[in-house]
Image: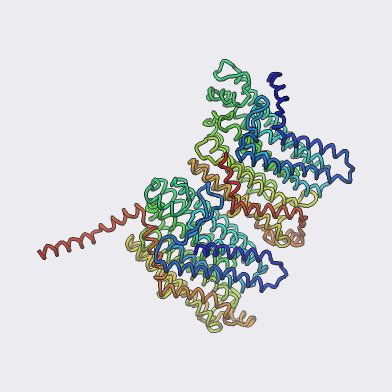
């Protein structure tokens, strides 16, 4: 990038193309500043400012998406910017509002969480904004430098968020574990990038160029050198770092401990946004003319094995946990497996034109289901983020039928039980898998749905029973006297709205699905 | 007419929503009345739809209409219509629904409002299964009806509800997933881009799916739906689940919901996967014999009344499967007829079992005896129900089993002979149960109970579900053509109309008997010359 391009960037206002990311980043700074300026008794308003900015941004992004769907390209600036670092257009129009929505949902859960915890608040929201902005940037990247910076910002942000509850040993332990394993994954990513840069810049090889980290140059180079062992290794190393984000076997080892130890809002963000960002980045690399698109034939068998392993391992491990955060973590591994089935179909590119829409729909439904369950969990859990065990929910229906009902809807949607929308999401994947004749993956998916019913239904059953399955009279007596906290009206309204939208989208997924075909 | 189809699904759901919206403080009586209205509307609509359909004298789909629910990318939309096979099942769902509703309001369940809401949701799903002809929605409505059943067992179930609910949920999910893959497979490999049964069968009658694919798809459907219908050896969830479930749930599940598996196999599997059905018919036949003989013997050994009825219901599913496996018009029509008859009789038996338990305070038959003296009308109902379930002529079950046997005769007399053993088995356990409960000497246990709680005969409210169900059984038993004509037309014109069946039909008509007949006519002709 020479000085002229830089001048060009400044003079053409290309910065404005990144307005959503910049809004979030600036709002993070504004929050920190307000925290200092505003007197402590008005502290609540700092958080509220953050919420208002996010709501406004979400509204603007939805309007933006609408313009994009209307197909008016003069209004929607499709193209590459910053000398090729950023590409605007495609699925990013969907992922941007998705991440902001997830961020807002996380704010809500953080609100419930901080009511019960004596912790400094503002930094948490500020860091979450930065992480969300980085995720949006990741889906826009067109160059491995942007890719790396965005991915690293996400990871570093999560180091802070995971270890945020400083007085909790669990949280600190989770922080250390995430730091070490996250660092390893960064190292692997760096190795892959270095190899790609080194070999792609070797002008003796066909297709090499001066900037092999630009996606289009990487694609040209990989096209010509798909059989080179070093390129293969580089591609696998870069994919491994994404597998860490998505939580795929064998890069899932951090999940149970980190999910359990991290504050519940962080866990929810890890479960939803981090996974979605990884999937979005994977699709970005393998889209038509994407950086790794020539390597499809090489990675499909490897990723298929990873997918099958994730589906089976995630579900079987989840069966053994009664700690709900650990269980949700491992069930998230199997959800990642489901998403990978769709991603494989996308990578193979054999004619299921609606597959990227099906992935988006799956992610959106996963967001709804996850936040319903995490919302219920944070409403119910006690002051010190306790009550995370399945048997702590025994008798919930008898005292709080509303919460039990919403929990059943959320968990049922995660399990994919009709008529809830989780079923429609899984149906799309099944149909796509059948059409691309991926019978082995389809069979594995079916088996893993049946296994997952065991632990999901166990949770629902506990919530509706009066006595625990343990046969422990002491525990049963304690539970029978237990009074579950009632949600505030805001929380109750949001829970009801999420629950109803899960049901509604199960019956009438029309608007979301019909707009898929535009991609 | 098509509005009535919508109404039959929506009416229970609207009343369920209304019940949920009403404040808790209102008297329970009001909830019960609203609940009964919710069950009454589909029952009346079911009868109207059935009669209107019978008047049309056809077997094809009628009263068609369509709503786009936003899944058109997948080729799915909510298409409503009934044919000769679904019309009697709509009637069945309506009648069993109102009977189960009355049973529910007369029961002593806690939280009656929630109980009725879930039961109404189930009823809406049940009506939905049989009034739509979009394969996806047939499945979808089945699942809607299934989920409340799981929750109701978990909340209101009897002893052992915890393992029973879990076993039933996992087993049925497995079955549902397998059949879903089968259905999606039909969609994907047909290439017609639609889940709608009419366009699928029109298209596939000319461009059938490759035979290898047909075989695997039919296998998926057979085992997936087989699990849902408790095909041997995948039946173990049924007896435990039904024993643990509250009675009205057992009535709806065993009476109507379980018929979904058979219904889908007949409506979808047979016409669309003709070659596949031939490949699997022998295996299906032997598994069905497992239901009849092995489960039949297990039923004979039961001492717990509800267990016995549950096992008996699993056993009778064997006959329906035999009818399907015979792959000829008589057998398949018999299977449909038996589905209706069995649904009515099993609901009646579950209903009576709880009435008996209310009086004897136990389900164990060796602690009963002599109930006929104290409650003669109840005993009368019990005898009638047992006779119907055994297949006594005059009740609808007789025609179902009889036509299935006729169908089997054409295919395999050996299987027929083995299946006939089942009649003896069911007569043995049925009569033994009647003797143990209604007649014979009073047991000590029963005497003790009777001293404590005086036994009264059943009153009119308790009688009403029984009267409805028995009446339906008798009407269909005495006038089987009311439903049989439509079933027969639908089966001959639509279900067994594909190429594969034409070939087998041709080979059947070329049997030696016909050739002999032809020869004699020829000889007579020459003789005249």
Horizontally, is B504 left or right of B124 in the view?
left
How far across and how far down the image is residue B320, in percent? 43, 63
**Residue B113, picture quadrant:** bottom right
What is the count of numbered marks? 0
Q: Is residue A308 visible?
A: no
Horizontally, is B139 left or right of B516 in the view?
right
How far across and how far down the image is residue B313, in percent? 49, 66
How far across and how far down the image is residue B438, in percent? 52, 79
How far across and how far down the image is residue B3, in percent? 52, 63
Q: Nearer the viewer, residue A401 or A83?
A: A83
Horizontally, is B473 left or right of A154 in the view?
left
Horizontally, is B129 left or right of A317 in the view?
left
Q: Nearer the viewer, residue A425 or B308?
A: A425
What's the image's color scheme? rainbow
Q: Hey, which residue is sitting farthest top in the picture?
A: A204
Q: Nearer the viewer, residue B346 or A29?
A: A29
Q: Quadrant of the N terminus of chain A?
A: top right
Q: Is residue A83 visible?
A: yes
Image height of B326 relative to A180, above or below: below
Q: Quadrant of the C terminus of chain A?
A: top right
**Residue A304, picture quadrant:** top right
Image height of A398 relative to A66, above or below: below
Q: Hey, which residue is sitting farthest bottom in the picture?
A: B373
Q: Hey, which residue is sitting farthest left in the picture?
A: B529
Image height of B64 relative to A111, above or below: below
- Residue at 77% across / 46% down in the picture? A110
């Amino acid at each position: 990038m020479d000085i002229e391009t830089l001048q060009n960037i400044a003079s053409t206002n290309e910065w404005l193309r990144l307005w959503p990311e910049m809004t979030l980043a600036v709002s993070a700074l504004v929050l920190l500043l307000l925290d200092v300026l505003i007197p402590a008794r008005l502290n609540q308003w700092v958080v509220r400012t953050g919420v208002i900015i996010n709501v406004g941004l979400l509204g603007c992004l939805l309007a933006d998406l609408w313009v994009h769907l209307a197909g008016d390209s003069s209004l929607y600036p499709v193209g590459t910017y910053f000398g090729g670092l950023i590409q605007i257009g495609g699925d990013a129009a969907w992922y941007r509002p998705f991440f902001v929505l997830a961020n807002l949902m996380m704010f809500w859960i953080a609100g419930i969480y901080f009511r019960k915890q004596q912790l400094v608040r503002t930094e948490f929201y500020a860091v979450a904004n930065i992480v969300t902005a980085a995720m949006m940037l990741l889906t826009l990247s067109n160059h491995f430098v942007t890719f790396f910076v965005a991915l690293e910002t996400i990871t570093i942000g999560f180091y802070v968020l995971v270890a945020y509850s400083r007085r909790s040993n669990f949280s600190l332990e989770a922080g250390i574990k995430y730091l070490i394993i996250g660092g390893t994954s960064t190292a692997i990513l760096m190795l892959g990038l270095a190899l790609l840069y080194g070999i792609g810049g070797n002008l003796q090889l066909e297709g090499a160029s001066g900037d092999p980290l630009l996606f289009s140059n990487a694609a040209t180079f990989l096209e010509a050198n798909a059989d080179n062992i070093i390129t293969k290794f580089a591609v696998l190393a870069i994919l491994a770092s994404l597998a860490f984000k998505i939580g795929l076997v064998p890069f899932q080892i951090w999940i149970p401990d980190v999910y359990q130890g991290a504050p519940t809002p962080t866990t929810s963000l890890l479960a939803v946004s981090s996974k979605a960002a990884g999937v979005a980045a994977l699709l970005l690399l393998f889209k038509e003319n994407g950086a790794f698109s020539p390597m499809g034939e090489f990675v499909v068998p490897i990723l298929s094995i990873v997918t099958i392993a994730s589906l089976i391992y995630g579900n079987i491990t989840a069966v053994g946990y009664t700690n709900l955060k650990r269980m949700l973590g491992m069930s998230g591994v199997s959800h990642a497996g489901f998403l990978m089935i769709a991603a494989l179909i996308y990578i193979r590119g054999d004619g299921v034109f609606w597959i990227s829409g099906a992935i988006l729909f799956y992610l959106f439904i996963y967001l709804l289901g996850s936040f319903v369950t995490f919302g219920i969990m944070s409403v119910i859990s006690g002051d010190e983020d306790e009550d995370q065990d399945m048997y702590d929910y025994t008798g919930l229906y008898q005292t709080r039928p509303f919460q039990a009902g919403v929990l059943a809807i959320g968990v049922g949607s995660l399990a994919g039980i009709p008529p809830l929308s989780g079923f429609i999401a899984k149906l799309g994947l099944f149909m796509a898998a059948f059409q691309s004749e991926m019978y082995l993956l389809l069979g594995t998916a079916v088996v893993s749905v049946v296994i997952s019913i065991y632990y999901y239904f166990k949770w629902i059953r506990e919530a509706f029973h009066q006595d625990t399955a343990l046969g422990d009279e002491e525990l049963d007596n304690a539970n029978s006297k237990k009074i579950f906290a009632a949600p505030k009206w805001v929380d109750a309204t949001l829970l009801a709205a999420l629950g109803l939208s899960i049901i509604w989208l199960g019956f009438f997924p029309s608007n979301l699905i019909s707009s898929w075909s535009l991609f | 007419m098509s509005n009535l189809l919508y109404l039959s699904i929506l009416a229970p759901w609207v009343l369920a929503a209304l019940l949920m919206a009403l404040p808790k403080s209102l008297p329970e009586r009001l909830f019960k009345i609203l609940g009964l209205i919710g069950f009454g509307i589909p029952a009346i609509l079911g009868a109207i739809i059935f009669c209107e359909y019978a008047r049309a004298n056809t077997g094809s789909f009628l009263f068609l209409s369509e709503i786009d629910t936003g899944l058109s990318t997948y080729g799915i939309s909510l298409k409503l219509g009934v044919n000769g096979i679904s019309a009697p099942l709509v009637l069945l769902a309506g009648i069993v629904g109102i009977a189960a509703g009355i049973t529910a309001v007369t029961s002593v369940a806690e939280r009656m409002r929630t109980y009725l809401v879930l039961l109404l949701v189930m009823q809406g799903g049940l009506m939905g299964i049989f009034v739509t002809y979009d394969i996806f929605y047939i499945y979808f409505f089945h699942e809607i009806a299934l989920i409340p059943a799981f929750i109701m067992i978990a909340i209101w179930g009897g002893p052992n509800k915890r393992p029973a609910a879990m076993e039933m949920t996992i087993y049925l999910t497995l079955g549902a997933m397998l059949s879903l893959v089968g259905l999606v497979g039909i969609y994907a490999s047909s290439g017609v881009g639609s889940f709608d049964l009419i366009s699928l069968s029109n298209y596939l009658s000319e461009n059938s799916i490759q035979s290898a694919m047909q075989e695997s798809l039919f296998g998926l459907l057979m085992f997936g739906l087989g699990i849902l219908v408790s095909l041997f050896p995948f039946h173990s969830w049924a007896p435990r689940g039904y024993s643990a479930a509250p009675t009205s749930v057992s009535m709806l599940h065993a009476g109507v919901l379980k018929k979904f598996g058979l219904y889908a196999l007949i409506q979808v599997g047979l016409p669309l996967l003709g070659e596949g059905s031939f490949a699997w018919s022998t295996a299906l036949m032997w598994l069905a014999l497992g239901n009849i003989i092995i489960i039949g013997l297990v039923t004979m050994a039961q001492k717990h009344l509800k267990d016995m009825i549950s096992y008996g219901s699993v056993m009778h599913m064997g006959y329906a499967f035999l009818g399907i496996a015979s792959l000829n018009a008589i057998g398949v029509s018999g299977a449909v007829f038996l589905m209706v008859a069995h649904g009515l009789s099993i609901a009646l038996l579950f209903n009576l079992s709880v009435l008996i338990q209310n009086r004897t305070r136990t389900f164990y038959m060796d602690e009963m005896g002599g109930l006929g003296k104290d409650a003669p009308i109840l005993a009368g109902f019990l005898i009638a129900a047992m006779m119907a379930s055994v297949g006594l002529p005059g009740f609808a079950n007789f025609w179902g089993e009889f036509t299935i046997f006729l169908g089997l005769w054409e295919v395999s007399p050996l299987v027929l002979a083995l299946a006939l053993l089942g009649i003896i088995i069911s007569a043995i356990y049925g009569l033994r149960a009647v003797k143990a409960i209604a007649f014979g000497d009073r047991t000590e246990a029963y005497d003790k109970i009777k001293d404590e709680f005086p036994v009264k005969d059943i009153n009119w409210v308790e009688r009403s579900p029984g009267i409805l169900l028995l009446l339906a059984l008798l009407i269909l038993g005495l006038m089987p053509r009311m439903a049989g004509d439509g079933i027969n037309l639908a089966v001959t014109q639509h279900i067994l109309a594909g190429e594969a069946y034409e070939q087998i039909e041709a080979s059947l008509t070329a049997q030696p008997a016909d050739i002999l007949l032809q020869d004699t006519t020829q000889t007579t002709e020459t003789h005249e010359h």
